């Protein structure tokens, strides 16, 4: 029997966000797939970027095939398939999750869901915290994830988050901070918010792309809050997933910030037909 020694990581959640190509440290950024060792701290074996010459969603499975072929990897060696599950582009997230499920089911691997907000911040300087990751911008609102520091949380952050998500929503962040876990490990998803709500959180940094609403940009400028571009990378997905044992592929689900437009339009059409 082949040893399961590999992790496959997939990142296609936000294809138009952040830098592409190689970062200063040589890390590949942008939509792609990565192969690493099946360890708590995985070592990168190889990376394959999705080709921009074609529709990137269509290149996902070919990119995985190229990666496997180049490193002589076999599906039976895959222990876990880690995927950036959103929020992000509806099609990109849906296809990535479907591909992860398919590969895991066929190979007998487990799946790991990596929130795209964690991936967006993974390669950003931790001194930017407390920060709010702003994804899926639409109609003046964003899907927000808070990246706290202990000092900010105790001084004002907990009460601000509590007002948005309620007591149950802050318990996990409180527990993780109590264990001394910071930054990515203590992130708290607060859902879709507008600029008034982000102002109540009073972060030092917004992590947001070129689609960040103008109201957020003006507020950040007026309050000397930094705006930092997110960095999406399959290697980040690989590293974040390292300590996660994973779940049954059937349980893997995307994070959708809002009901897809197609569903909203279908509901409206159905209602008008009644």
Image (cartoon, rainbow, N blue to C red):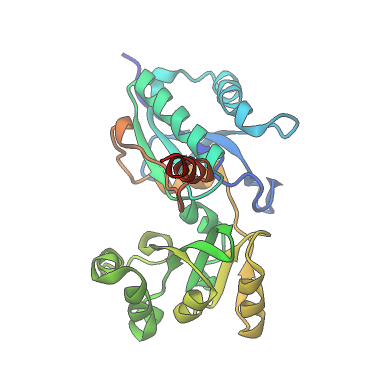
Residue 50 in sight in this render? no
Give the mark count. Answer: 0
Please name whichever residue, 258 or 205, is drawn nearer the observer in this view of the structure.
Answer: 258
- To which quarter of the image does residue 78 belong? top left
For the N terminus, which image quadrant?
A: top left
Q: Residue at x 65, y 59 (%)?
A: 211
Pinpoint residue 151: horizontal percent, then vertical percent: 38, 81
Q: Residue at x 45, y 78 (%)?
A: 201
Pinpoint residue 115: horizontal percent, then vertical percent: 43, 50
Pinpoint residue 258: horizontal percent, then vertical percent: 46, 52
For the C terminus, which image quadrant?
A: top left
Please name whichever residue, 52 or 194, is drawn nearer the observer in this view of the structure.
Answer: 194
Q: Is residue 240 left or right of residue 123?
A: left
Q: Is residue 255 above or below residue 106?
A: below
Residue at the top extreme? 1
Q: Residue at x 53, y 48 (%)?
A: 88
Residue at the right extreme? 53
Q: Is residue 4 above or below residue 86?
A: above
């Amino acid at each position: 029997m082949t040893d399961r020694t590999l992790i496959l990581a997939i990142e296609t959640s936000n294809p138009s966000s952040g830098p592409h190509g190689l970062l200063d440290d040589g890390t590949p950024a942008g939509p792609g797939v990565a192969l690493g060792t099946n360890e708590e701290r995985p070592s990168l074996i190889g990376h394959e970027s999705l080709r921009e010459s074609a529709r990137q969603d269509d290149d996902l499975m070919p990119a995985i095939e190229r990666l496997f072929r180049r490193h002589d990897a076999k599906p039976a060696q895959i222990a876990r398939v880690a995927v950036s599950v959103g929020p992000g582009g509806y099609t990109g997230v849906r296809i990535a999750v479907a591909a992860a499920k398919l590969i895991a089911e066929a190979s007998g691997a487990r799946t790991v869901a990596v929130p795209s907000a964690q991936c967006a911040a993974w390669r950003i300087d931790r001194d930017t915290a407390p920060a709010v990751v702003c994804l899926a911008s639409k109609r003046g609102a964003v899907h927000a994830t808070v990246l706290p520091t202990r000092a900010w949380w105790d001084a004002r952050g907990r009460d601000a988050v509590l007002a948005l998500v309620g007591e149950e929503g802050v318990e996990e962040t409180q527990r993780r901070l109590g264990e001394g876990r910071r930054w990515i490990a203590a992130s708290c998803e607060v859902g879709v918010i507008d600029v008034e709500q982000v102002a109540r959180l009073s972060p030092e940094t917004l992590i947001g792309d070129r689609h960040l609403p103008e109201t957020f940009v003006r507020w950040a400028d007026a309050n000397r809050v930094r705006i930092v571009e997110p960095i999406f990378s399959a290697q980040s997905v690989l590293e974040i997933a390292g300590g996660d044992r994973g779940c049954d592929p059937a349980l893997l689900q995307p994070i959708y910030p809002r009901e897809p437009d197609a569903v909203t339009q279908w509901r409206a059409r159905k209602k008008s037909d009644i």
